[in-house]
C-alpha cells in the first residue's frame, strides 16, 4: 500500500509548554485514521503543523514518499502536496457565496485570464447535487455558505477536496455540535472519501463516530501517542476501555 504521509520525531512547544513530544505518524493511501484524546492533548496542534498553518520545532516529514523541506513548508505547499484541512475554528467565509467558497484561491480562469464565474457556478451546482445530494428549493451556487446546515458545510469542504483531487483530507471535529441527521451525513461523506481512495485524518471526541468510519485509531495523551491500533485488532468496547484506562492514569 502506498504511504502518503510519514512523520517522524515531531516536536512542538508553545512557550514553555511541550505540546507535541516525539510524534511518529504514518498514513496510507485510502486510509481513514481517527485522532483521539482529551482536550488539550495536542490534536489540533498536530494537524495545524501538518497542514502548514504552524511549524513543528523539529520533525522529519515525508509526503508521497518525498522528503519535505520544513523550513519552506506552509499552507500553500501543503495544499500543493494534496492536503485539504477543515479547521476546528472554521467560521471563515460564512457570508461568501458557495461557488466562491469552493474556488477561493484556485479560481477557474478563461483563456483571457479572467475568472470564469459561470463555469465555477456550474461545477458548484454539480457538486451540490451529486455529492451533497442537495435538492433544496431555491438552493443555488449563489446561496451563502451560511444557508447550509453544519453538516452540509463540512460536506462542502469534503466535496472541494474531492474536486481538487486532494490526497489527504483533515477534519478537526466535524461532527461536534451537529444534529444527528447532519452527523450521519458527515460520516457518509467520510466513507465516500474512502471510496475515492482518499486518506483522511479525523479528529473527534466521539468514539462511536471514530469506530464507524476509521481503519485505525491513534490516541494522543498530553502530547504523546499512547495508542496506535488497527480496527481489525480491537473491538469498540476494548478501545473504549483502553482510552478510559489511559485517561484515568493521572
Ligand atoms: N497558539 C497557542 N499558543 C499557546 N498555547 C497553545 C496554542 N495552541 C494550543 N496551545 C496549547 O497547546 C495544548 C494543545 O492544544 P490543542 O489545541 O492542540 O489541543 P486539542 O487536543 O486539539 O484539544 P481540544 O480537544 O480541546 O480541541 C493546549 O495546552 C493548548 O493550551
Ligand atoms: Mg482541538
Image (cartoon, grey):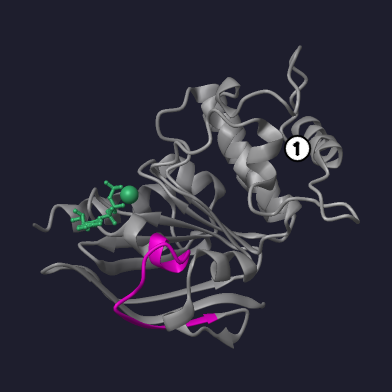
Q: Tell me: residue 225, above or below residue 61.
A: above
Q: Tell me: residue 68, above or below residue 189.
A: below
Quick one: quadrant of the C terminus?
Answer: bottom left
User: With 63 as the anchor, is 125 left or right in this view?
Assistant: right
Residue 37 pos. (x, y %): 29, 53
Q: Residue at x 82, y 40 (%)?
A: 123
**Callout 1: few (<14), some (14-19), or many (20+) C-alpha neighbours within 10 Å?**
some
- In-front residue for pair 95/56: 95
Q: Is residue 188 among the parts visible in the rendering?
A: no
Q: Which residue in the protein does label 1 denote? A: 131
Q: Residue at x 44, y 81 (%)?
A: 70
Which region of the structure is painted magenta?
48-62
Residue 234 pos. (x, y %): 44, 59
Quick one: quadrant of the N terminus?
Answer: bottom right
User: With 163 as the anchor, is 248 left or right in this view?
Assistant: left
Indicate the quadrant where residue 173 lies. top left
What kind of element bears circle 1? helix
Q: Tell me: residue 2, above or below residue 122.
A: below
Residue 65 pos. (x, y %): 61, 85
Q: Residue at x 67, y 39 (%)?
A: 100
- In-front residue for pair 112/183: 112
Q: Residue at x 67, y 32 (%)?
A: 98
- In-front residue for pair 52/50: 52
Q: Is residue 191 magenta?
A: no
Q: Is residue 193 among the parts visible in the rendering?
A: yes
Q: Is residue 56 magenta?
A: yes
| Residue that extends furthest to the front in the rendered view of this protein | 112
Residue 17 pos. (x, y %): 14, 66
Indicate the quadrant where residue 55 lies. bottom left
Amino acid at each position: 500500500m502506498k504511504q502518503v504521509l510519514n512523520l517522524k520525531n515531531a516536536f512542538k512547544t508553545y512557550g514553555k509548554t511541550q505540546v507535541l513530544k516525539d510524534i511518529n505518524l504514518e498514513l496510507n493511501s485510502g486510509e481513514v485514521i481517527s485522532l483521539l484524546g482529551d482536550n488539550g492533548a495536542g490534536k489540533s496542534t498536530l494537524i495545524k503543523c501538518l497542514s502548514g498553518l504552524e511549524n513543528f520545532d523539529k520533525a522529519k516529514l515525508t509526503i508521497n514518499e518525498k522528503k519535505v523541506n520544513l523550513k519552506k513548508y506552509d499552507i500553500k505547499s501543503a495544499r500543493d502536496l494534496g492536503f485539504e484541512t477543515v479547521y476546528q475554528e472554521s467560521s471563515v467565509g460564512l457570508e461568501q457565496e458557495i461557488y466562491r467558497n469552493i474556488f477561493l484561491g484556485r479560481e477557474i480562469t478563461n483563456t483571457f485570464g479572467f475568472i470564469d464565474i459561470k463555469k465555477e457556478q456550474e461545477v458548484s451546482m454539480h457538486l451540490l447535487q451529486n455529492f451533497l445530494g442537495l435538492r433544496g428549493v431555491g438552493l443555488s451556487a449563489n446561496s451563502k455558505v451560511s444557508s447550509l446546515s453544519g453538516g452540509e458545510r463540512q460536506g462542502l469542504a469534503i466535496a472541494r477536496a474531492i474536486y481538487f483531487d486532494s490526497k489527504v483530507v483533515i477534519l478537526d471535529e466535524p461532527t461536534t455540535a451537529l444534529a444527528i441527521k447532519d452527523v450521519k451525513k458527515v460520516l457518509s461523506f467520510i466513507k465516500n472519501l474512502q471510496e475515492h481512495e482518499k486518506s483522511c485524518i479525523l479528529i473527534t471526541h466521539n468514539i462511536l463516530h471514530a469506530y464507524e468510519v476509521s481503519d485505525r485509531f491513534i490516541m494522543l495523551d498530553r502530547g504523546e501517542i499512547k495508542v496506535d491500533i488497527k480496527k481489525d485488532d480491537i473491538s469498540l468496547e476494548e478501545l473504549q476501555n483502553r482510552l478510559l484506562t489511559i485517561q484515568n492514569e493521572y
